[in-house]
Amino acid sequence: MRRPFPYRAEVLTILALIAAPFVLPHLGFTPTTINRILIWGMVGIGFDLLFGYTGLLSFGQSAFFGSGGMFAAYLLTQTSMQNTLFALLIGTIAAGVLGYLVGLVALRRTGIYFAMITVAIAEVFFYLEFNPLSDFTGGENGLAGVPTPSVSLGFTTLEFDSNLSMYVFFAFWYFVALALALRIVRSPFGLVLRAIRENPLRAEALGHDIRKYKLAVFVVAAMYAGFAGGLLGMMQGFMPPDAFMFATSGEIVMQTAIGGAGTLFGPLLGAAVWLYLSDFFQVTLKLGAAWRLILGVVFVLLVVFLRRGLAGAIIDLWHLVWPKSAKVAATPQPTQASSADTADMQAARKDTRTHEGPILQATGLTKRYGGLLANSDINFSVDHGEIRGIIGPNGAGKSTFFKMLTCEVQPTSGKIVFDGRDITGMGVIDACQLGLTKSYQINQLFEKLTVRQNLEIAALGELRGKFKLDLFKDLHKVPKLDAHVAGTAALVHLTERLDTHVSELAYGEKRRLEIGLALATTPSLLLLDEPLAGMSAEERVETVALLRSIAQGRTLVIIDHDMDSLFELVSKVTVLQEGRLLVEGTPDEIKSNPQVQEAYLGGVMEEV
Ligand SMILES: Nc1ncnc2c1ncn2[C@@H]1O[C@H](COP(=O)(O)OP(=O)(O)OP(=O)(O)O)[C@@H](O)[C@H]1O
């Protein structure tokens, strides 16, 4: 199948940017409004990377918009600098540095707390601009006399001092900003951002250092805002102090919501609607102060009825009219695993220091939750190549035990040695990078992404390490990635479903993908937490066969309540009861152990 032309978005953007100054005036847009739309669209691209792609709702973009603009304006009005491009560059870098410092603080919290910190930070910047720094920023007057953009070519200087020429300058930079953002979202870095949006806990468990990724995208978004702030000063001839106002951040959020988050084009569409309507209500209809009320109502209606914004609605319409082409576009290339890929995956393991004896040893492992002792003084050892089962009644502490082994939860006391290294106190990211990971009892998938993307996210942690700033690298040029994904998909029988969204998979398929994610990290020790949980009898049979094939040549520890299946798979069983290790032995020994029958199985064992 021919792969669709990959740069359609870029080409359509160029065509739209060429057409806009000829078409939009006929629809009632003034030249200044058109230029403003481009500026807001640029801030919005950065914000969309942060919010739409990474799920970080920031109300602090005004701080960077204002700061970047003020730096550039100050250089051009208060110093001898005349090079507008250089001033823009300095403003952008300054916004990036401030973004880094703010991000270090704000990203220590998540969700609503992160959003609240960004609100507070925007207010702090606003205060600084108006008060202690007013000598530099002009306080409430802003900085007047900012020159229009110009570019010196040596033999001549291009002046962008009319509305149309300025449009050309802004449109050029809008295109550059968009093309860079498109590269980012198509890169491995961009895929990890989506993983963070969908399921940060799993992204970490797959070995990605999500704090670094969040900080990096926060800086990128700040730089976009700072650059656009510089352009605003040049467009207006003065840098307005209201760029710093909280309302500016609010407008960026609302424009992105109207236009469609997670699309990159959404903020531009949102800005077009927002600015057009605000002109229309104020200038044409002369509504006075009531324009904000009407605009608010329109905003609510748009967000309620177009949940994916204007860009989402356009994309849905496109898919409705051209369903076939849409399907082709969403399906890069069916990846069939070659037998070599599958063999590679079967053989793939993280190198271990030792190849014999215990790969994992836990000594005196204890976990206390307040007054509850979830695990108490557990001594546990697994050898290379062993398939171990863990059983125990509900609440026996099995999942807590796994969480401690994979460093998701820190033990209250005790020691864990993995492959000769003391990993006690290590984080889940590093444990995964070392080759120790688990599949979850309750699926932890990236629901809105495809099976392929899920497996890619898992494989990238293995192939790139815990953090890499490969912003502009093509995802499909990551060496071995496609083969790795194809091999894992074949192992968990999901090759035919690679381009299906996870939300459309059957439950059994999701469970297989759950195992596939863990496998794609090529662990040297894989822990499976109730892989058969919630499955139908038919799905159980399939999954047991799958586990049997995966088990070959691997070191596995499996928790499950389905003892018939588990006892067939494992060579040794550990029984936990009330947080303590009750007994260990072969499946036959466990079946006939009176202590187990008495304390745990209550006679059920006799029927097994
Ligand atoms: N984060 C937590 N905070 C407080 N108590 C917890 C926490 N996680 C687990 N527990 C408690 O620790 C005990 C052991 O829980 P755990 O989930 O490890 O058991 P389990 O053997 O995996 O059970 P199941 O078979 O039902 O999954 C339970 O009493 C549980 O309520």
Image (spheres, grey):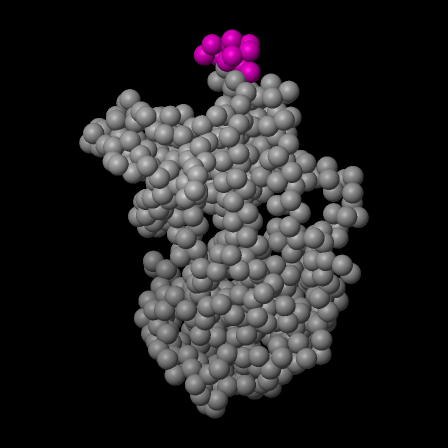
Quadrant including the N terminus: bottom right
> Between residues 14 and 485, which one lies in front from this camera angle?
14
Work out whether 182 lies above or below 64: below
For residue 508, side relative to residue 578 (left or right): right
For residue 72, side relative to residue 450 (left or right): left
- All told, the count of numbered labels is 0
Location of residue 232 by image quarter? top left
Tell me which segment is drawn in magenta: 280-290
Location of residue 604 by image quarter? bottom right
User: In x, y percent, where is residue 576?
Assistant: 48, 73
Decide if residue 118 is in sight here.
no
Q: Residue furthest front?
A: 155
Residue 227 on the magenta segment: no
User: In x, y percent, where is residue 454?
Assistant: 60, 60
Decide if residue 7 is in sight here.
yes
Work out whether 148 lies above or below 296: below
> Between residues 111 and 147, which one lies in front from this camera angle?
147
Location of residue 605 by image quarter? bottom right
> Between residues 96 and 210, which one lies in front from this camera angle?
96
What kind of secondary structure does the magenta stretch mostly adopt? helix
> Between residues 401 and 372, which one lies in front from this camera angle?
401
Residue under the point 32% across and 26% down: 145
For residue 442, side relative to residue 121 (left or right): right
User: In x, y percent, where is residue 272?
Assistant: 56, 28
Residue under the point 40% across and 64% down: 409
User: In x, y percent, where is residue 352?
Assistant: 46, 83
Residue under the point 35% across and 39% down: 83
Residue under the point 74% across and 42% down: 319
